[in-house]
Amino acid sequence: MQMSKGKVSVTHWARALDSGMDVVLKHSTLENSRCFVEAGLLARVSGCPGVVKLVDTISLPDCFVLVTERVGMHCVELRDYIDDNMGEDGNVGLREDVARLLFAQIVAVVQRCAEKSVVHCDLSYKNVVVDTLTSQVALCDFGAAMHSHSGYFLEYHGSAQWAPPEWFVTKRYTADGITAWQLGVLLHNLICGAEPYWYPEEFARGRALEIDSDVVMSSACRELLFSCMAVKEEERLSLAEIARHPWLSGVADA
Ligand SMILES: Nc1ncnc2c1ncn2[C@@H]1O[C@H](COP(=O)(O)OP(=O)(O)O)[C@@H](O)[C@H]1O
Ligand SMILES: [Mg+2]
């Protein structure tokens, strides 16, 4: 059954006849040479908890197929999970404790990838799936991922919607800079149930983040969100700083 159709790939789910395993097949055309990079980087992180598991790769004459284990019969994309659960207890987005449970898992899996020198570069609510029974998250789609290093990246393969502001201005970004920005956008999605902007270029022109007055969040959460989405890259938190932020450890008010 077809699950999604991207610009250069089509994703289906299927059941393997021999093992009975539910799998996701991502077919990419061979013009998309990134599919081989995706397979290589996914192979590096595939054993990490919270990353979809690579089962196989298949090279056919006209396409390349990446086979991953389907996360579970009850999994949904994070954007659908937010839509289905927002508005509880008078919150505009998800309840803050629920948002923290999900965000902490996302940060932990991004850290595990960083330990394997992989930076995802397309963290978004479309590329995080949530098991609705266990609330466990899994990160998929390494199609824009890069081998991490401490310098600047000069190529960006993710969606323009989640590109950090500096990409629009300087056409370069760092691993920590893009990661903090995209985690900030995700945190905004979780807490506010909406996008932080219509056009990402607005931030490149210097617009600062504004939160709708009807959104209620703790001061610690607000501080984390603004520190991830600082327009100036050098003012954002590093991944390590995000991971030990008081809001995530639950020490700060929720
Ligand atoms: N292993 C998986 N288990 C469950 N769902 C998955 C899995 N891999 C991908 N998906 C779903 O399929 C969608 C498309 O896959 P993705 O790799 O993101 O392709 P694209 O590059 O077209 O965005 C994802 O947004 C996610 O909802
Ligand atoms: Mg995707």
Image (cartoon, grey):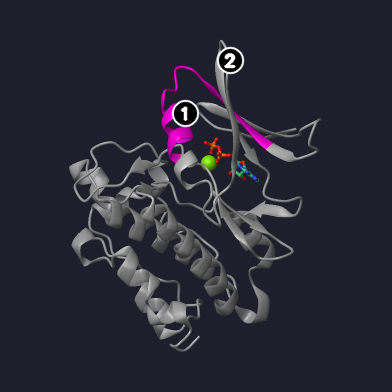
Split into quadrants, the picture shows ligand 1 in the one at top right
Horizontally, residue 128 falls left or right of residue 19, namely left
Residue at 34%, 49% (x, y): give it.
117
Horizontally, residue 159 falls left or right of residue 21, namely left
Q: Nearer the viewer, residue 194 or 116?
A: 116
Mark pair 1, 2: CA separation = 13 Å
Q: Residues within 10 Å of mark 1 (few under 14, many from 20)?
A: many
Q: Which residues are magenta?
A: 24-41
Q: Is residue 31 above or below residue 179?
A: above
Q: Secondary structure at mark 2?
A: loop
Q: Secondary structure at mark 1?
A: helix
> Which part of the image, by quadrant, shows the N terminus?
top right
Query: Residue tagged by mark 1?
Result: 35
Q: Is residue 229 visible?
A: no
Q: Is residue 176 visible?
A: yes
Residue at 52%, 46% (x, y): give it.
46
Label 1 or label 2, whichever comes before in sequence order: 1
Query: Residue tagged by mark 2?
Result: 60
Q: Residues within 10 Å of mark 2 (few under 14, many from 20)?
A: few
**Toward which corner of the image does residue 152 lie, by quadrant?**
top left
Q: Nearer the viewer, residue 53 or 230?
A: 53
Residue at 23%, 50% (x, y): give it.
166
